[in-house]
Image (spheres, rainbow, N blue to C red):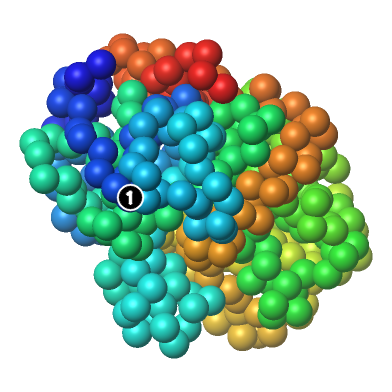
């Protein structure tokens, strides 16, 4: 085909518009990737609500939790970021944040390359009009060119992995990194009790990551019961505390402490993004416990908090945002290793690639009627 369909948005609050753009030529170290599945992320929802803290190049195509199949590539694109061979037909994923590799943070603090000063991020970089660009998984195809932007990274997915499951690699990576941050600070050890605040897609995947990384017990605080808390239990959470029945912070704190017993949890991870989660979560911890914040990244709301409690309780407080390039393969390998261990099909609800379908996917995510709304531009390709 000579054209590609993409879903674009004119700005915050706008609905999706399916547009047709011309299919690009594919030079030496470039590729066209047909999208098989792309999730609706909380970041997408924040952007559509106008919460993103920086100016954005409206109109553009959203969607970064993507997985697809290479349908065309140049001869110079031989391997993915990890050295695995790439060919037409290879299943791949692309992370949204591409550190440049040469700025001050990338060179001197590679473990924090997610703070790159010159990332490939929300950029239009193709030399033709309204491209299906890197940040645009709500589309039939995306285009990548390593000569134009050397920071671009492609990761091959296992052939046996479905693209629906592969589209979970990016959000799972964020969970793994957050827990590894706790490990590096001595705040997460095998057998520890972990409380996860938030039962959305990140919260559910954090259950998987915590269990596979050695947590002894996992408790989730969130809502609604169906389908979110039920899925967290299906993924292995020992218990869940519902925001619908425990309507005050103290009620939730008491419920968590009743479940975990003793002095409180060893580790609390905030995946909720709710402004009040921090003060509530630290009271679920034992003294000397560790709190990891991975849900706060916009100025969507504010609340007065007694953050002096961090000092009084002698808490190790960690911020964890996104991931580095070397974290992605860990998530891919974990998804592959546990592919038959979890009911993945219960997590993702599919939506067709139409204006109505994209709009319904967004609304379903906003209403929390599903755990992970997933747009499927191309059915039957993996």
Left or right: where 242 falls relative to 43 = right
Residue at (64, 71) in percent of width and height = 181
| Residue 111 image position (x, y, % from top left) | 53, 76
| Residue 97 image position (x, y, % from top left) | 39, 57
Residue 14 in view here:
no
In the image, 26 versus 129, the foreground residue is 26
Q: In this view, does 164 lie above or below 106?
A: above
Residue at (69, 80) in percent of width and height = 185
Q: In this view, does 186 lie above or below 321?
A: below
| Residue 200 image position (x, y, % from top left) | 57, 38
| Residue 319 image position (x, y, % from top left) | 53, 70
The tally of labels here is 1
Residue beneath label 1, please?
Answer: 29
Q: Which residue lies furthest to the front in this view?
A: 75
Q: Residues within 10 Å of mark 1 (few under 14, many from 20)?
A: some
Residue at (38, 73) in percent of width and height = 101
Q: In which quarter of the image is residue 225?
A: top right
Of the 4 image quadrants, the one containing the N terminus is top left
In the image, 103 versus 212, the foreground residue is 103
Left or right: where 103 falls relative to 161 = left
Q: Please tell me whether mark 1 sits on a helix, a strand or a loop.
A: loop
In the image, 353 versus 293, the foreground residue is 353
Residue 72 in view here:
yes
Of the 4 image quadrants, the one containing the C terminus is top right
Residue at (64, 51) in percent of width and height = 331
Left or right: where 223 falls relative to 60 = right
């Amino acid at each position: 085909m000579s054209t590609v369909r993409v879903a674009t948005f004119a700005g915050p609050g706008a609905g999706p518009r399916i547009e047709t753009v011309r299919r690009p030529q594919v030079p030496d170290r470039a590729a066209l990737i047909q999208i098989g599945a792309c999730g609706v992320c909380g970041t997408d929802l924040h952007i559509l609500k106008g919460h993103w803290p920086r100016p954005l190049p409206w109109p553009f195509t959203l969607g970064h939790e993507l997985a697809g199949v290479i349908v065309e590539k140049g001869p110079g694109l031989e391997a993915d970021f990890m050295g695995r061979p790439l060919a037409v037909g290879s299943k791949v994923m692309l992370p949204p944040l591409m550190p440049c590799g040469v700025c001050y943070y990338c060179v001197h603090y590679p473990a924090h390359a997610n703070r790159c000063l010159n990332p490939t991020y929300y950029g239009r970089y193709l030399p033709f009009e309204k491209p299906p660009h890197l940040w645009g998984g709500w589309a039939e195809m995306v285009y990548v060119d390593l000569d134009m932007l050397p920071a671009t990274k492609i990761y091959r997915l296992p052939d046996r992995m479905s693209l629906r499951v592969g589209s979970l690699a990016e959000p799972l990576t964020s969970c793994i990194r957050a827990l590894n941050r706790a490990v590096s600070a001595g705040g997460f050890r095998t057998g520890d009790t972990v409380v996860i605040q938030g039962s959305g897609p990140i919260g559910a995947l954090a259950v998987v990551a915590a269990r596979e990384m050695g947590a002894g017990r996992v408790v989730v605080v969130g809502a609604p019961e169906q389908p979110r808390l039920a899925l967290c239990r299906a993924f292995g959470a020992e218990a869940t505390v519902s925001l619908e029945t425990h309507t005050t912070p103290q009620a939730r704190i008491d419920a968590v402490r009743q479940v975990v017993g003793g002095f409180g949890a060893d580790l609390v991870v905030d995946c909720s993004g709710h402004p009040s989660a921090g003060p509530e979560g630290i009271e679920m911890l034992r003294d000397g416990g560790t709190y990891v914040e991975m849900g706060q990244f916009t100025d969507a709301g504010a609340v007065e908090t007694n953050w002096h409690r961090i000092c009084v309780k002698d808490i190790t407080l960690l911020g964890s945002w996104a991931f580095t390039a070397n974290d992605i393969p860990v998530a891919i390998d974990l998804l592959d290793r546990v592919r038959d261990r979890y009911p993945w099909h219960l997590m993702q609800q599919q939506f067709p690639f139409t204006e109505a379908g994209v709009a319904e996917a967004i609304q379903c995510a906003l209403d929390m009627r599903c755990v992970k709304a997933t747009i499927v531009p191309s059915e039957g390709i993996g």
